[in-house]
Amino acid sequence: MTLHTHADGVPRCAWCAATPSYMAYHDHEWGFPVADDRRLFEKLCLESFQCGLSWRTILEKRENFRAAFDNFDHEKIAHYDERDVQRLLANSGIVRHRGKIEAVINNARRMSELLEREDSLAAWLWRFEPPRTPSPQMLTETEVSRTLSKELRKRGWKFVGPTTLHAFMQAMGLVNDHAEGCALRAKAEAARARFVVPR
């Protein structure tokens, strides 16, 4: 993965140079570990909306998505019906794709089922954290993301392919894929070292 040095003199992963919103996301969110169920569920939903699109499209609409989907409260979304689907399809502030909208509703229901057996979504997801060793750069999926994808699909989740889940794992800090030489790589690794893995 290549680096980009911005006007502030800080070397960063090259992908974040595309837009200021990317840089803020890169510096403050991407690769830092998350244990909050709502944030994890939100990210799974947004990654599913990204399928076939750029993350920039989704990131720029993120606040619209949050407003449209009750701040990704899975309990509320689990009760959505066809009227909500139609409401969301009419919302020009989000990606209006029926299959993805219905997948979010389905996945909210599947999350409710998972929480009947597990203490939290976070505790379940972090079981799939790979060994904390330097990871190869520029992968689009891994054996771990394929395993997680298989487990979620077995439980009825949708739009959770291995590429989607690898991007999710990168973003939520289950792996640290900041490029070697990126100033945020060490900060993300320090955050991971302090992070108490939910059980």
Image: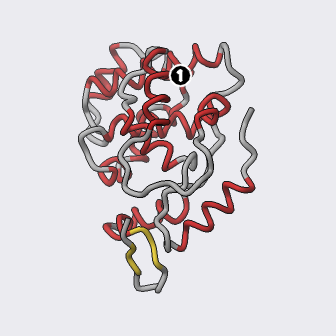
Between 93 and 199, which is closer to the camera in this rendering?
A: 199
Q: Element under label 1?
A: helix
Compared with 70, 177 (above or below) is below
On the rendered structure, is 188 left or right of 139?
Answer: right
For the point 37% across and 31% down, which residue is it?
A: 161
The quadrant in which residue 94 appears is top left
On the rendered structure, is 44 left or right of 124?
Answer: left
Compared with 190, 174 (above or below) is above
Quadrant containing the C terminus is top right
For the point 51% across and 17% down, which residue is it?
A: 110
Check disc 1 and give the amino acid type.
Lys
For the point 52% across and 33% down, which residue is it?
A: 41
Between 145 and 43, which is closer to the camera in this rendering?
A: 145
Residue 139 point in image, percent of width and height: 38, 50
Q: Which residue is mark 1?
A: 76
Q: Dot 1: few (<14), some (14–19), or many (≥20) neighbours within 10 Å?
A: some
For the point 50% across and 54% down, which residue is it?
A: 135
